[in-house]
Amino acid sequence: MNAPRRICVVTGSRAEYGLLYWTLRGIAEDPALALQLVVTGTHLSPAYGLTYQQIEADGFAIAAKVDMALTDDSELAIGRAMGRAVSGFAEALHQLQPDLLMVLGDRYEILAAAQAAMLQRIPIAHIHGGESTEGLIDEAVRHALTKMSHIHCVAAEAYACRVIQMGERPHTVHVVGAAGFDQLSRTQLLGREALEQAIDCQLGQQNFLVTLHPETLDDASPAQQVQPLLEALAAFPEARVIVTGSNADPAGRKISELLKRHAEANPARYCYRESLGQQRYLSLLQQVDVVIGNSSSGIIEVPAVGKPVVNIGERQRSRLRAPAIIDCPSQSDAIRAAINQALTPEHQALAAKKQTPYGEPGAAEKIVRVLRDTPLDGILQKRFYDVPVEIRA
């Protein structure tokens, strides 16, 4: 009997772990595979709740921890942390000797893991490639990961075409749907009363869920990114506003601090929670009237729950859109108008149809099958796949 194929999976954030959960479970339960889970990034940060502890509570053994020692979210600190991460991943991968590294998305810590794997000639499988977010440095990171990877599991046919357009051979590209949809269909949700106890926040008759991340290619200060949103929310005094923390992009901590300070100054209307976790987050989606901000979850998962989304600014520009999403610039009047539109019976009914371009649940099963069945012999020798184009004069 052949030894199980060793699959090393890297996770660096709460949101990414939620997307990976059922794939991790599938790998762990497949006798032909052996899971090696490596945690890094904000999972190891007290400022973000030490979320690696939730991973352990979920029953996963952590094979290695790569501490980036991220002191703050400035460009300099992140650059230094990436250097430490490459070194840490090199040590971890050398010790674990995986047959395949699996990564998801577009985070800088994931790029560090891929760099270390590339130099050790470890094949890489990348999930959620081919997407476009023009307002972020993540755009470059995601496409760099595509070119460093040998197996591609994408969320939609349009993204498969883009990966192939970047020179990846079609037989290496697999359309599996959105990884987060498995959580939507398989997570046991909390009822309203249990949810209120779990998040220590009483909901109102009208509820908004807000998540605002930095626009990393924008010159606007954190205050300039936050203020238009707060001004718009002030126009809805009856709404209960639940705010979650920003991510670890440059200026993310400052945005979180500003939102937290505002929530603490207005406790009758606002609840700030740094991290909800998947069960509480998905349960809360069932109770809110609109999701506001600029997270990828608002673009991908929330429409599949049947809730309207107000997407602010350029962070998610060029991602495929569901009809439930209302795009608006980061201006208070525009945000207020978008929220009003989202609250209309017509738009609520449109959102309730749960239309989405990202397929159906089942991505985890498809990804596990690809990881198990793809031949690895000779996979490191990539040949560029040319797409015919008109040669410029």
Image: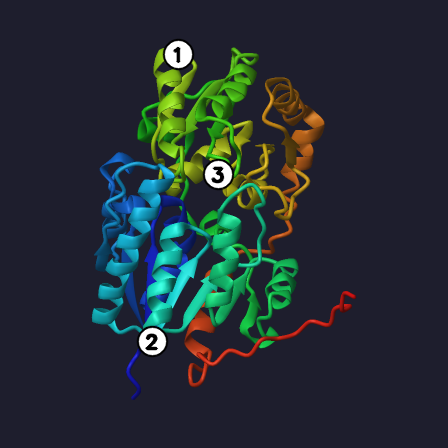
Q: Quadrant of the C terminus?
A: bottom right
Check whether the beta carbons of the residues at disc 3 and disc 1 lie within 8 A of each other.
no
Identify the disc placed on residue 99: 2
Amino acid identity at mark 1: Asn
First in sequence, mark 3 or 2: give its number.
2
Q: Residues under labels 3 and 1: Cα distance?
A: 28 Å
Alpha-carbon neighbours of circle 2 within 10 Å: few (<14), some, or many (≥20)?
some
The answer to whether 2 is drawn above or below residue 205 in the figure is below
Q: Quadrant of residue 35?
A: bottom left
Alpha-carbon neighbours of circle 1 within 10 Å: few (<14), some, or many (≥20)?
few
Of 176 and 71, the residue lying toward us: 71
State the residue at coordinates (40%, 22%): 259
What residue is pinned by disc 1? 266
The answer to whether 274 is drawn above or below residue 278 in the figure is above
User: In front: mark 2 or mark 1?
Assistant: 2
User: In front: mark 3 or mark 2?
Assistant: 3
The percent position of residue 166, horizontal first and vertical second, equals 60, 65
Amino acid identity at mark 2: Asp
Of 314 and 209, the residue lying toward us: 314
Residue 65 can be seen in this image: yes
Looking at the image, residue 315 sits to the left or right of residue 77; the answer is right
What residue is pinned by disc 3? 216
Check whether the beta carbons of the residues at disc 3 and disc 2 lie within 8 A of each other.
no
